[in-house]
Image (cartoon, helix red, strand yellow):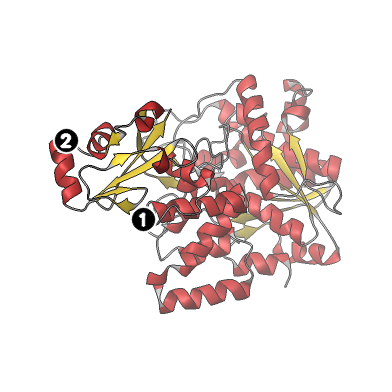
Amino acid sequence: MNILEDLQWRGLYTDCTALEELTKRLEEGPITLYGGFDPTADSLHVGNLVPLIALRRFQNYGHKPIVLAGGATGSIGDPSGKKAERQLLTKELLAHNVACVKKQLAKIVDFREDIDNPARLVDNADWFSSIGFIDFLRETGKYFTVNSMIAKESVKSRLGGDNEAGISYTEFSYMLIQGYDFFHLNDTYDCELQIGGSDQWGNITVGTELTRKKAGKSVYGLTFPLITNADGSKFGKSVGGAIYLDPARTSVYRFYQFFINVDDRDVIKFLKYFTFLSHEEINELEAKHNENPGAREAHRALAFEMTKLVHGEEATNDAINASKILFGGGLDGISENALAQVASEVQSATIAKADLESEEGLSILDALVSAKLSQSRKTAKKDVQGGGVNVNNERVQDLGYKLTPADVHYGKYILLRRGKKNYAVLNVE
């Protein structure tokens, strides 16, 4: 099976500028391809993963990927899929964002120089900084009519109707800049293929046209479907907002939970889209899911593979253990990182180490009130007597129970629970 057949099996094919020609070209040998992203934030999010993972899929088949960071295009703003103008970012902020996401990119595509086809990271600000406005109009703008540009969906959707704001000349020119990127990469690195979401079709075809008209070369564009959930909502959003790859923005625990909680109707589709599991492994998971969806084996595989890809296997196992704790599992053998993930997800209170070391210790009733799990000592008594209070997920029914240093994990954490789902962490200082 070749890369195009693999993409089609996974549902990762929407359109291609010349599928038959591209198929023949890929049969001849490795190809250089690129996918771009505009660094509008200091972290990528899960919506960026499909084209980035697709670059790695091509790389695994021996092809040479280029990841383009849009330091120039990001300062303009892509109108594709947008109803209004983007907020313009400063050059300093764009440079900061590019620097931040480099480490994330290295987890998806392989930049190691000791392999035959290492990935390359480029920034289009590097070549646009030396191109003058008049030169750009003469050398690029002359190849395109306003009529053809207005016909692009990204522009057409912003014109007419109730959209009084329309589209600025700045965003209108975006497609020419992206088109020039393709021409430049073809001229510099012999790049022959651009990949992206289906909303990028208009921008991609500008690049294929420009390269054909300006250099007399045939290059190709390939697009993937835009990812939506089974209910039609946009993929990559949760109650707390976008799901980012940076653990400082989205914790590893929440990242794992996002994928393990996908709709049953989406889980097999997402296994195909996002993971590097083989066709046979996915087919087996699909059969098990259809037979017993309640076992959630496909969900666990999806969450594990995605979290491992982005955060590594150790952090993934910590997230799994944190999940078990928050569903009542014991703390025996738990790592400090897993417990820290739990602490970051629940309410907390700070207690003094001296209070635990004193002869009196810290009353479980006072601890429940301090952690705001009980409103008062009176309600705390009822909670303990009712059997609903746990210290480190072990039930406590003794009203005289005192917290001591023996209850502290890693010198700083005590986990309290009231009922099945009300957790709090006491941070010992």
Residue 196 coordinates in the image, percent (x, y):
63, 49
Mark 2 crowdedness (10 Å alpha carbons): few <14, some 14-19, many ≥20: some
- According to the picture, the residue beneath numbered tag 2 turns out to be 377
Q: What residue is rendered at 27% in x and 31% in y?
A: 370
Q: Which residue is mark 1?
A: 327
Q: Quadrant of the N terminus?
A: bottom right
Mark 2: secondary structure:
helix
Q: Amino acid at mark 2?
A: Arg
Question: Front-most of 72 and 22?
Answer: 72
Task: Tell which of 123 and 305 is nearer to you.
Answer: 305
Q: Position of residue 308 (x, y in %)?
A: 60, 54
Q: Are marks 1 and 2 in contact (CB under 8 Å)?
A: no
Task: Give the CA separation, mark 1 to mark 2.
Answer: 26 Å
Name the residue rendered at 18%, 35% in the picture: 375
Q: Who comes first in sequence, dot 1 or dot 2?
A: 1
Q: Residues within 10 Å of mark 1 (few under 14, many from 20)?
A: few
On screen, residue 407 versus residue 226, left or right, reads: left
For the question of whether residue 345 can be seen, the reply is no
Along the line of sight, the residue nearer the viewer: 180 or 75: 75
- Tell whether 125 sits left or right of 74: right
- The quarter of the picture where residue 346 lies is top left
Label 1: state its secondary structure.
loop
Residue 104: which numbered mark, if any? Answer: none
Q: How many marks?
A: 2
From the top left corner, tell me how far across and down residue 312 is, in percent.
62, 50
Q: Left or right: where does residue 29 sit relative to residue 177?
A: right
Quadrant for the C terminus in the image: top left
> Residue 6 is drawn in which quadrant?
bottom right
Q: Looking at numbered disc 1 in the image, what kind of residue is underneath it?
A: Phe
